Image (cartoon, rainbow, N blue to C red):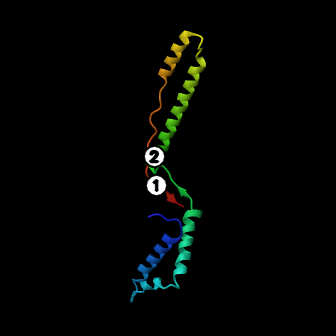
């Protein structure tokens, strides 16, 4: 379940938690949460919880909490470094090329053929795991 775009889900969860608690009393009083006079209170609490989680909280992640995401970041960094090396190799090969010398074309082709082409971009994880603090 997500938090949703506003306080609605938080208010509903708070209301239902209170209903469960009140239903443990003898006699059960869970239906009290349906009183229209009580709704604004749960809405206010829901709004506060929603703002804490969406505005005030900090979401963090670490390799221990989300190894798939951090492996993706590591693999992506490796690919970027390979692309930089590929780019540098291209620039070096073309800088050494002299179109007026026939042998220079052969050297260019050889230099380009020797470049290590980076692998495919790693697939991004389908979810992120972390915690709110």
Residue bearing the label numbered 1:
129
Q: Quadrant of the N terminus?
A: bottom left
Report x, y in % for residue 55: 59, 63
Q: Are marks 2 and 1 in contact (CB under 8 Å)?
A: no
Report which quarter residue 25 is drawn in: bottom left
Report x, y in % for residue 42: 52, 78
Report x, y in % for residue 20: 41, 79
> Which of the two labelled residues, at mark 2 and mark 1, occupies the earlier sequence position?
2
Viewer-nearest of labels 2 and 1? 2
Q: Secondary structure at mark 1?
A: loop
Mark 2, other Cα within 10 Å: few <14 / some 14–19 / many ≥20: few
Residue bearing the label numbered 2:
124
Report which quarter residue 133 is drawn in: bottom right
> From mark 2 to mark 1, how far is it between C-alphas?
13 Å
Image position of 22 with respect to 109: above or below: below
Image position of 5 with respect to 20: above or below: above
Mark 1, other Cα within 10 Å: few <14 / some 14–19 / many ≥20: some
Label of residue 48 in the image: none
Q: Secondary structure at mark 2?
A: loop
Residue at 52% x, 81% y is 39
- Residue at the bottom extreme? 27
């Amino acid at each position: 379940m997500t938090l949703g775009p506003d306080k609605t889900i938080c208010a509903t969860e708070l209301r239902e938690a209170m209903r469960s608690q009140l239903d443990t009393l003898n006699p059960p009083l869970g239906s009290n949460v349906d009183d229209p006079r009580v709704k604004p209170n749960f809405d206010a609490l829901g709004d506060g919880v929603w703002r804490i989680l969406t505005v005030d909280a900090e979401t963090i992640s670490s390799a221990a909490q989300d190894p798939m995401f951090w492996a993706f970041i590591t693999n992506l960094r490796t690919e970027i470094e390979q692309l930089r090396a590929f780019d540098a190799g291209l620039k070096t090969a073309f800088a050494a090329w002299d179109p007026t010398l026939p042998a220079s074309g052969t050297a260019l082709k050889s230099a380009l053929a020797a470049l290590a082409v980076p692998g495919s971009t790693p697939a991004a994880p389908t979810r992120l795991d972390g915690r709110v603090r």
